[in-house]
DNA sequence: TCAACATATTTATATATTTGAATATACTGA
DNA sequence: TCAGTATATTCAAATATATAAATATGTTGA
C-alpha cells in the first residue's frame, strides 16, 4: 500500500482534535525511545526477573543463583550478560566467585509494581 | 555440567547470609511472573511505545497512526494486536475506522517514568 | 605445578519476533 | 450493487532470542 497521508483519503474525526498527538512526550527523543525499549526488553524475561528479584536483599554469585533458580550455569551466564549490558547489574569478583549487584536498587520496587500489575 | 547444589562444592559467603533470597517476592507466584514478563515484552518495542504514547490524550484510528508514525498499515496492525493481547489497548469500531484506546491510562505515567529512566 | 572448581565464552539448535507485501474482509456512500 | 477506503489477516523472509552442551579461562589451595 502506498504511503498514507491524512490529507488525501483518511479523515475521520480529525476536526474534533486540535492536532494529532505527538508520538512521544516532550523532551523524549528517539535515542531515549530505543534505550527504553531495550531496557524493557532486558526485563521482559521470566528468568531475568527472577534474577533481579533474587538480588534485592543481597548480592549473589552465579552458583547460588544456580541453586536458587535451578537453571544451568551457561543459561544464567547469558542472562546475566544481558542484564549487565542493560546497565541493571554489575559483577564484583571475589576470589573464584562473581557476585552480582543491582546497580539501581529502585528497580526492586519497580518490579514489585509490575509484578502486581500496578502501572 | 551437572546440576549444581550449594551443599557440595560452591559455598561462598553463605554463612553471612541468613538464607538465600527468594527468587520472587511473597505473594507473587509463577503465573504472575510469566504474565509480567509478557506485558513487559509487549512494552519492549519502540514502535509499540510510540503507539501507546500517541494514545495518551485521545484515541486514534489506524490511518492516523500511519500518518503520525510513518509506518505501513500492516506493520501497525501487527503491533496493535500485540498490545491488545497484552491487555493494554482495545479497539472501538466507528464506521470504517477502528479507534484504539488505552485500557489503563496509568500506563501513560508509567511510560513517562521509564522513558526518563526513573525506576 | 596441578587438580578442582567457578564462571565466561563458543557453538549449535530451536523458537520467536519483526517487517511488509499481498490478499481478504468489512463498511460506506453513490 | 458497486467502487473506494480502512483495517485485519496471511504469508514469507530476515533477524533476534533462548537454551544448554561443550569448551576455555581464571582462581585457589595443596
Image (tube, coloured by chain):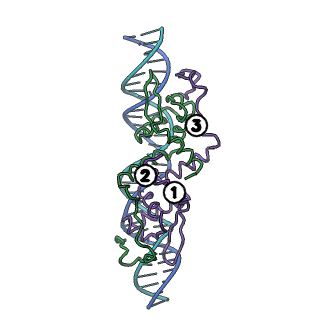
Chain colours: A green, B purple, C blue, D cyan
Percent x, y for residue A84? 42, 37
Q: Are marks 3 and 2 on the same chain?
A: yes
Q: Residues within 10 Å of mark 3 (few under 14, many from 20)?
A: some
Contact check, label 3 and label 1, Cβ < 8 Å: no
Please report the residue visible at 48 percent of the width from the left and 68 percent of the height from the top.
B58
Tell me if residue B68 comes above or below residue A47 in the rendering. Answer: below
Tell me if residue B89 comes above or below residue B92 in the rendering. Answer: above
Tell me if residue A87 comes above or below residue A35 in the rendering. Answer: above
Q: Which residue is tagged 2?
A: B115
Looking at the image, the residue that sits furthest to the right is B27
Distance from disc 3 to disc 1, alpha carbons, whole Å, reads 26 Å
N-terminal-most mark, 3 or 2: 3
Q: Quadrant of residue A98?
A: top left
Nearest the viewer among C13 and D20 is D20
Nearest the viewer among C3 and B85 is B85
Percent x, y for residue B116? 42, 50
- Indicate which disc residue B107 carries: 1
Amino acid at each position: 500500500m502506498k504511503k498514507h497521508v491524512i490529507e488525501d483519503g483518511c479523515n475521520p474525526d480529525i476536526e474534533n482534535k486540535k492536532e494529532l498527538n505527538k508520538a512521544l512526550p516532550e523532551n523524549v527523543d528517539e535515542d531515549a525511545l530505543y534505550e527504553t525499549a531495550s531496557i524493557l526488553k532486558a526485563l521482559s524475561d521470566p528468568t531475568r526477573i527472577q534474577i533481579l528479584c533474587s538480588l534485592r536483599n543481597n548480592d549473589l554469585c552465579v552458583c547460588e543463583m544456580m541453586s536458587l533458580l535451578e537453571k544451568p550455569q551457561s543459561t544464567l551466564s547469558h542472562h546475566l550478560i544481558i542484564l549487565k549490558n542493560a546497565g541493571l547489574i554489575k559483577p564484583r569478583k571475589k576470589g573464584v566467585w562473581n557476585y552480582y549487584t543491582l546497580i539501581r536498587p529502585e528497580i526492586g520496587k519497580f518490579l514489585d509494581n509490575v509484578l502486581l500489575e500496578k502501572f
